Structures are given as C-alpha cells and as structure tokens.
Image: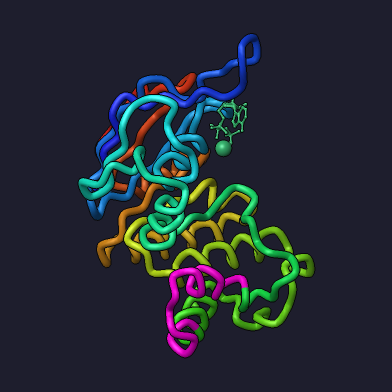
Amino acid sequence: MIQLSDIRITFGKENNRIDALKNVSLEVRQGEFLAVMGKSGCGKSTLLNVIGGVLKPTKGSYLFEGNDVSAFSGKQMAEFRNRNIGFIVQNFALVNEMTVRENVMLPLAYAKIKRSEAMKRAEEAMERLGIIQYEYKFPSKLSGGERQRVAIARSIAADTSVILADEPTGSLDEATGRSVIDIFKELNGSGKTIIMVTHDRELAEQGTRMLTMKDGEITGAQAL
Ligand SMILES: Nc1ncnc2c1ncn2[C@@H]1O[C@H](COP(=O)(O)OP(=O)(O)OP(=O)(O)O)[C@@H](O)[C@H]1O
Ligand SMILES: [Mg+2]
C-alpha cells in the first residue's frame, strides 16, 4: 500500500543543512499497525509528514497504492491527503475559532461529504472519544487531553484508510492513553492502516510491527 524507496528529506541551506531523513526505505501493507520509536529529533514526524503527503521528498520515491505521490502537484497532494489520510499531529492543529463539532467536521467538508452524513459521522466519533458534551465549546476552553481527543475524533470521522498519529497519547493520562490505543486497535481490526509515533514502549507493543529510528534512518524493525 505504502512504498518508500531511498527517501531523503533535507531542510535548510548550506551550513544549516540537515538531513532529517536519509535513505529511508519502507513498505507498509494495508491493515498494519506500525509503531515508530526513536529519540527526539531522529526524524519520526518528518517520516509521517512524507507518508501523509505534507512533505515532498528531496530525493527518492513514494508510491501509494501504486501511484507516485512524489510526482504529485500541490493540488494533487491535497486531494491525496483528503481522500486517504487521517492525521493526528503533535500539536493537534485544531482551529481555535471553530467549535469542537466544527473541527471534527472539517475534513468531511474538505472531502465533500454531504452535511447530514458528515454530522452523523462527527457525532459518532465524538461519542466514541467521550467528548460529545464539549461539541459546542471552543478548543481553547479544553484541557490538553480533551483537545487531543478532539484531534483523534476528527481523524476517525473522516474514515480514511490510513491514520497517522504523532504521539497521540502524549498529553493523556495512562487510562485515557490506553483507551485511545484500544480505539486504534479496533480501527485496525476493521482494516485501517495505522502508523503511530510514540515514546511509550508498552503502547508501541500494541501494534503489529515496531520500527526504530536513529539520526534520520530506520535502524530496526520488529514484528510483534
Ligand atoms: N521545518 C523544518 N526546518 C528545519 N529543520 C527541521 C524542520 N522540521 C524538522 N527539522 C529538523 O529535522 C530533524 C528531525 O525532526 P523531526 O521533527 O522529524 O523529529 P522527531 O523524531 O519527530 O522528534 P520529536 O520526538 O522531538 O518530535 C530535527 O533535527 C529537526 O530539528
Ligand atoms: Mg516529532
């Protein structure tokens, strides 16, 4: 489903150049639940951004279901993201001027889902994450953990085949963190492909495969 070959991502110019990813090759099959671990700065978020069609590789190729994403135009990349990728980013990227409900519905609007259907899906997702009581609140009035759940609800409401999660349990207490992983496992059981960055080995072990990264490279892969 996902095929990365010799991906390089270089940021900055001349003396400030940094290779955030170096020669990364990775294949992910549909239905995998991949956990990505590694020290801060090793390139985990960068890897998710490449897979999510946010960053174009400086070098290398990225095939998604046989399509060459690395050759897409900006517009094609946006379409690709809306259609295929649910993204839970590190800082949640909620829109502060929108209510919880509007935030959850946002990707559905981008994907041109009918409003009645979008409302139904958003409500289901908010119920599932236990945030339905906050639906008319603004993100700035919520705790970090509650905002995190809004971001997760938003990514599952969109019902994409791939979910990318960058430390989705980072600001949650242990019990809530575990319930998020249970939701991921359930989604994974229904066929969704999940790639999750985490610093928590115990949570990583809930996946089907664990990758270890170091200095912009994948240094280990272990089936679980
Ligand atoms: N937009 C950018 N411009 C310049 N350098 C960047 C940019 N984004 C990331 N980097 C650098 O690339 C490297 C990899 O960053 P990345 O965010 O992928 O790390 P990470 O593994 O996700 O770390 P963390 O666990 O702290 O989130 C770091 O050295 C970082 O400083
Ligand atoms: Mg990161």
Residue 224 seen in the current view = no
Q: Quadrant of the C terminus?
A: top left
Q: Residue at x 37, y 44 (%)?
A: 72
Measured as percent of width and height from the top left, residue 125 is found at 48, 76
Determine whether, in the image, residue 1 is placed left or right of residue 124: left
Relative vertical location of residue 12 with respect to residue 51 in this rendering, above or below: above
What colour scheme has been applied to the protein in the rendered image?
rainbow
**Segment colored magenta:** 103-118
Q: Residue at x 74, y 73 (%)?
A: 138
Relative vertical location of residue 30 with respect to residue 57 in this rendering, above or below: below
Determine whether, in the image, residue 145 is placed left or right of residue 59: right
Measured as percent of width and height from the top left, residue 70 is found at 36, 38
Measured as percent of width and height from the top left, residue 132 is found at 60, 81
Q: Quadrant of residue 213?
A: top left
Residue 43 seen in the current view = yes
Q: Quadrant of residue 114?
A: bottom left
Outermost residue toward the bottom? 116
Q: Predominant secondary structure in magenta?
A: helix
**Count of residue discs:** 0
Q: Residue at x 36, y 59 (%)?
A: 84
Relative vertical location of residue 135 with respect to residue 213 in this rendering, above or below: below
Magenta-drawn stretch contains 187: no
| Ligand 2 - quadrant of the structure image | top right
Identify which residue, 170 or 162, lies in the foreground.
Answer: 162
Identify which residue, 178 or 101, lies in the foreground.
Answer: 101
Q: Residue at x 27, y 67 (%)?
A: 190
